[in-house]
Amino acid sequence: MVLDFPAGIYLFMGDRYYHDLQTFAVGTPTGIFIYWVGVFGFNLAGRWVIRQFPEQRQAGQRLAVMVLILEVVMLIMAVFDLWVFSIIPGSGVVFSVERLKLIVLFGCAFVFFLCLAIGLVHIYSQWQERQTEIEQLKHHALQQQYDALKWQVNPHFLFNSLNAISALIGEDRALAERFVDNLAKVYRYLLKTGNQPLVPLADELNFIQTYAELLQTRYGESIQITLPPLTCSIQGCLPPISLQTLIDNAMKHNLMTTNRPLFIQLSLIGETSIRVTNTLQPKKKTLNIYPHNLANLRAKYRQWPVQPVEVEMDDKWFTVTLPLLSVTTEDKSH
C-alpha cells in the first residue's frame, strides 16, 4: 500500500486507470478503501513506536524501529491490496510476484522517507513544547520578580508599620526601637534575596522569626506564630520569602482577634519538607493586598523536578507542605 494515491493506483492498475472508464470506475472506490486502511495501519504503528521511544535522545532508535515496523506493515498491506485489486471484477489486475516486487520496492523507499518525516515532525513538536515551557517559566519568573518588588515597596505594609512605630514611641520606646530594627532587617532580606532562586532554610527561618516579631508586635495576642528550632542542621533550601508568603496568605483569608487568635505553626517534616499550618476561621471578604500568593508559590515549585506543593484543608486547619530543595535541584532546573 502506498499512501500517495495517484502513484499507488498507477502501481496497481497501470495506464488503464487513466484511460479506461470501467477501470477508473472500479479502481477509484477500491483505491480509496485500501488507502484509508493503509492510513489507519501506518498511523497506529507510528504512534505506538513514538510512545515507546518518546525522548529526543532516542531519535535514532525511534527511526530504526519505526522503519522496521512500518516496512513490515507495508509488506502486509502490499500483499493485501494487490490481492483485493486482483479479485475485483473489471480491474484487470493479476496477482503476480513481479508486480508485488515493484510495489514493495517503491513502498520501501516511501516508508523510509515517511518515517524520516514523522521523526522530524515529532522532534519539532517536542522543541515547540519545550519553547512553550521556557516561555511559561520566564513569565512566572517575571511575575515573581514583579510581586516581590511590589511587596518591597508595598505602601500598605509600610504605612501600617509606621503607624505601629508612631503608637509604640509614646508607649514603649525600647519596643519601638526593636520594631524599627526588625523592620530594617525584613527589608534588607527582601532586597538581598529578590533575585535569588533559592535561599538556605536557616536564612528563611531567621527571616521569619524577625517577621513574626513584627507581626506579633503589631497584632498582639490576635496572632500566635510557632517556629521550629532555629538551630536545626537541615541543609535544604526554599524559594525566597516562601514562608512569609504562606503566613501572609493565612492572615489575608482568616479572622484575627484577641478572642479568636490566628494560630500559625511551622514544623519540619524529617529532612525533606516544611509544613505551615494555620487555624481555619475564614473572613467573609478578603482584601486583595497580596494577589495570587499561593498560586505563584506553586508556580515557582513547578520549575524544579520535585514533589509539588501539597495543600490540605479540613474543618479546622489549613495546611501547606513545601518540599525542601537543594543546589543540585536548582542546577537540574536550568
Image (tube, rainbow, N blue to C red):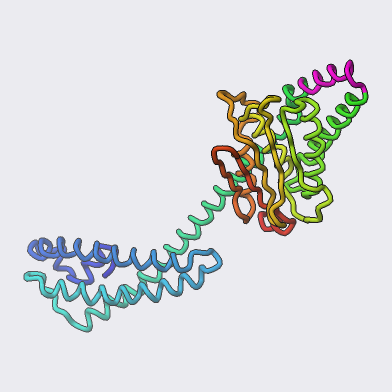
Does the rendering let one see residue 146?
A: no
The magenta segment = 160-173
Q: Quadrant of the N terminus?
A: bottom left
Q: Position of residue 84 (x, y in %)?
A: 16, 72
Q: Is residue 77 magenta?
A: no
Q: Is residue 161 magenta?
A: yes
Q: Name the residue rendered at 79%, 34% in the picture.
A: 211
Q: Nearer the viewer, residue 27 or 135?
A: 135
Q: Position of residue 85 (x, y in %)?
A: 15, 72
Q: Name the residue rendered at 56%, 53% in the picture.
A: 130
Q: Predominant secondary structure in magenta? A: helix
Q: Position of residue 64 (x, y in %)?
A: 45, 74
Q: Quadrant of the C terminus?
A: bottom right
Q: Name the residue rendered at 54%, 47% in the picture.
A: 132
Quadrant for residue 277, please give it: top right
Does the rendering let one see residue 322?
A: yes
